[in-house]
Image (cartoon, rainbow, N blue to C red):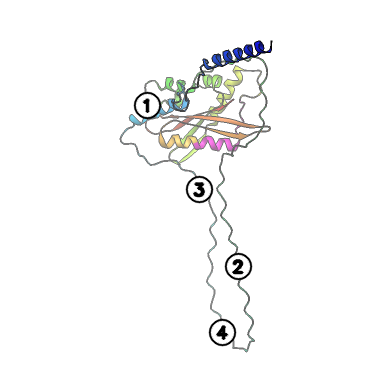
C-alpha cells in the first residue's frame, strides 16, 4: 500500500514539473529604448512652430537690440568729501610713547543673494482632495486659435481686433500689456481689464468675483517679465510657476501673445493667465 502511494506522488510531481516547463514567461518590452510619443496639440510645440513662422517672415530692417530692459535698482552714491583746510603745526611737545594696539580684524560681510520675483516651490505640501462625483467641464476655446483667427492673414493681429466680450466670456484672466517703446516701459491696460471684468460679470451675474486668480504684485511682476520677452523678441512665449496661497500653492501658466499695428514692432502683449489643476 505504501509503495502505491509513493508511486502516485512521484507521478504527480513529474506531471507538475512538466507542466511548469511548458509555461512561457512574457517579458515586458524595454520602455527606455522606445522614444516617447509627443502629445499632439501641445502648447509648447504650437508656440515653437509659430515662433519659427514669425522668424521666417521677419523683415530685414528689424533691429535685433532689445528695446525693453529691467529697471536697475538705484543705489545711493556716497557724499563727496570736503577737503580739510591745512592747520598750523603745533609746537612739539615731549609725549611718552604708547604701546601699539593689536590690529583689528576686518569682518567680511558676504554680498546678499539676488531675490527672485517668483517664489520657490515648497515641498511636501498637502493638496486638498478632489471633490467626489462626476463634474462635467465645458471646454473653452483655445486662446492661441483665437489669436490666429483675429490675425486675418497678417503677421500679427492688432489690439483693435480684440473682442473684450468674447475674451471676458472664455478667458476672464486675460490682461493686456502696453509696450511704450519711447519710454522703454511696460504697463497694464486698466481700461481693457475693466471691460473684460464687466463682460465676465454679465456672463455670470451670480458670480461674486470675475477672476479666480489673485493678481498679487509677485504675479504681476512675473507676467510683465514674460511680456518683456515677447516685446523684445517679437515671438510668443509661455511659462509655468507656483505661487503661495492661503492653504496651498497654486500652479499658474501664462501664454503671452504679441500684437502689432505696423507688423514689425510689438506695441501690445496679450497675456492669458491660467490656473492649472
In the foreground, 103 or 159: 103
> Residue 137's quadrant in the figure?
top right
Task: Tell me the magenta residue range.
Answer: 211-225
Residue 174 percent coordinates (x, y): 53, 27
Circle nearer the N terminus (3, 4): 3
Most foreground residue, 173 or 159? 173
Neighbourhood count class around disc 3 (C-alpha, 10 Å): few under 14, some 14–19, many 20 upward: few
**Residue under numbered circle 3:** 72
Q: Earlier in the sequence, mark 3 or mark 1?
A: 3
Horizontal side, residue 259 vs residue 246: left or right: left
CA gap, disc 3 and disc 1: 33 Å
- Which of discs 1 and 2 lies nearer the camera? The answer is 2
Kind of element beneath mark 3: loop
Which tag is nearer the camera, tag 2 or tag 3? Answer: 2
What whole-number distance in Å separates the C-alpha atoms at marks 4 and 1? 80 Å
The spot of residue 97 in percent (x, y) is 63, 85
Label 1, on which residue?
A: 155
Q: Is mark 2 on a helix, strand or loop?
A: loop
Residue 78's x, y, as percent?
54, 61
Crowding near the residue tagged with mark 1, few <14, some 14–19, many ≥20 C-alpha atoms within 10 Å:
some
Give the image location of residue 259, x and y in percent: 43, 29
* Residue under label 2: 105
Q: In which quarter of the image is residue 95?
A: bottom right
**Is residue 43 shown above or below 82?**
above
Q: Can residue 57 be seen by looking at this rendering?
A: no
Amino acid at each position: 500500500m505504501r509503495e502505491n502511494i509513493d508511486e502516485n506522488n512521484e507521478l504527480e510531481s513529474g506531471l507538475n514539473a512538466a507542466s511548469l516547463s511548458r509555461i512561457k514567461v512574457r517579458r515586458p518590452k524595454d520602455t527606455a529604448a522606445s522614444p516617447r510619443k509627443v502629445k499632439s496639440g501641445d502648447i509648447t510645440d504650437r508656440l515653437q512652430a509659430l515662433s519659427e513662422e514669425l522668424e521666417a517672415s521677419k523683415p530685414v530692417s528689424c533691429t535685433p537690440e532689445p528695446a525693453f530692459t529691467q529697471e536697475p535698482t538705484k543705489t545711493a552714491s556716497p557724499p563727496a568729501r570736503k577737503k580739510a583746510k591745512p592747520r598750523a603745526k603745533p609746537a612739539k611737545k615731549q609725549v611718552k610713547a604708547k604701546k601699539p594696539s593689536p590690529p583689528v580684524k576686518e569682518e567680511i560681510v558676504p554680498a546678499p543673494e539676488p531675490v527672485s520675483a517668483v517664489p520657490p516651490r515648497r515641498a511636501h505640501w498637502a493638496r486638498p482632495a478632489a471633490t467626489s462625483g462626476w463634474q462635467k467641464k465645458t471646454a473653452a476655446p483655445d486662446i492661441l486659435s483665437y489669436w490666429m483667427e483675429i490675425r486675418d492673414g497678417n503677421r500679427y493681429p492688432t489690439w483693435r481686433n480684440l473682442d473684450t466680450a468674447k475674451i471676458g466670456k472664455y478667458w476672464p484672466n486675460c490682461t493686456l500689456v502696453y509696450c511704450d517703446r519711447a519710454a522703454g516701459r511696460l504697463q497694464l491696460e486698466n481700461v481693457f481689464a475693466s471691460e473684460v471684468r464687466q463682460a465676465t460679470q454679465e456672463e455670470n451675474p451670480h458670480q461674486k468675483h470675475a477672476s479666480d486668480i489673485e493678481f498679487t504684485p509677485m504675479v504681476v511682476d512675473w507676467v510683465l517679465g514674460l511680456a518683456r520677452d515677447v516685446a523684445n523678441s517679437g515671438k510668443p512665449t509661455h511659462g509655468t510657476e507656483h505661487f503661495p496661497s492661503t492653504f496651498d500653492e497654486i500652479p499658474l501658466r501664462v501664454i503671452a501673445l504679441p500684437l502689432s499695428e505696423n507688423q514689425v514692432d510689438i506695441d501690445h502683449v496679450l497675456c492669458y493667465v491660467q490656473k492649472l489643476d
